[in-house]
Amino acid sequence: MRLSVIDAGSHTVRLVVADTKDGVPLPVHTAKWKLRLSEQVDPDGVFGQAATEQLADAVARAARTAARWGAPRPLAFATAVVRNAPDRAEVLAAVHARTEVGMRVLPGELEAELTFLAVRRWMGWRAGPLALFDIGGGSFEVAFGRGRTPEFAISLPLGARRLTDEFLARTDPPATAEVLALRREVRHHLRDAGARIRWEHPHTAVGTSRTFQQLARLCGAPPGRRGPFVQREVERADLRSAIDRLAARSALGRCELPGISAPRARQSLAGAIVGHTAMKLSGLKTLTVCPWALREGVLLRHLEDGPGWWTTLADHTEPLPRYDQVP
């Protein structure tokens, strides 16, 4: 069986077409469209016509590509950049009218649960009690669990792009006072979650997302061309040093550092601060970077629980469910 998933995030609309023989989603084709939606929305998060049309066009192209690769209509979802938009209903309705793809907006807690499922399947049961950290553009997900799904899952307003816009947009490189204010904000939001993870004593701690992958490379992990099966870790001490390196450079200058791409250079400092603070408050010295995340979690949930779970999720006319209310 062949499935496909479309993920509309802050920077990019991504398509993954996967073969699912034996219950494992193995990608056969991937594609992405760099829209940088977070830079196009109004300061209050409103999409407006131009950004909506670009999103609809990218989803249409992704759906056509999936069809050419023999996949049925994609499972399409949008993360915080659409979820938090005041005109979310109009955006999703426009996408559906243009593409006939019913795009879902996932609650942050459900994002954490699905990502946790993907990480559990990648890491295996030998990982034991597992803590998860996922840095997105608009939100930061934290989860902990001993089984297939987490016992604890939350979403916090600590996305790397969101924090950059709020705290680090005045000067480039940022002033020391701006960095300190950002660190205080992150500590404030992560205090309770960090205490919970510390109390649980996870056997394994995992970071997912493109942000963690780039930070790991900056801290000395093997490059992506070595493939997904190479062990990649981030040491807390190395991440602390990386914060100083990033803070001392402009966004353009950060592109010269290993692993830091131009589209994410501006928000890399905020991502590093979130990652380091989460590790410190949770009492963790090392994170393993996992290549599977939310997209794989959606595919795995579809394979393991059947298509019914997807149809129960909210569209733009219904209230968003809590993650623990989804069958």
Image: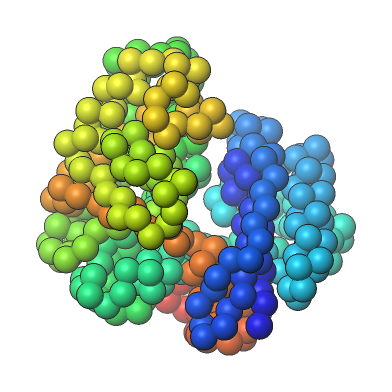
| Residue in view at x 82 percent, y 61 percent | 64
Q: Is residue 41 left or right of residue 58?
A: left
Q: Tell me where residue 61 appears, x and y as whole percent.
A: 80, 54
Identity of the residue furthest to the right in this view: 98
Relative depth, front residue between 306 and 127: 127
| Residue in view at x 47 percent, y 24 percent | 255
- Looking at the figure, which quarter contains the N terminus? bottom right
Q: Tell me where residue 271 appears, x and y as whole percent.
A: 38, 37
Q: Is residue 259 left or right of residue 133?
A: right
Q: Using the rendered image of the protein, determine whether residue 250 is visible from the camera's viewpoint.
A: yes
Task: Decide: is 75 above or below 325.
Answer: above
- Colour mapping used in the image: rainbow
Task: Decide: is 289 above or below 115.
Answer: above
Task: Decide: is 36 above or below 16.
Answer: above
| Residue in view at x 45 percent, y 62 percent | 292
Q: How many marks?
A: 0
Identity of the residue furthest to the front in this view: 226
Relative depth, front residue between 163 and 283: 283
Task: Decide: is 120 above or below 256.
Answer: below
Q: Tell me where residue 327 appears, x and y as whole percent.
A: 50, 84
Relative depth, front residue between 92 and 67: 67
Q: Report which quarter residue 182 is drawn in.
A: top left
| Residue in view at x 54 percent, y 73 percent | 25
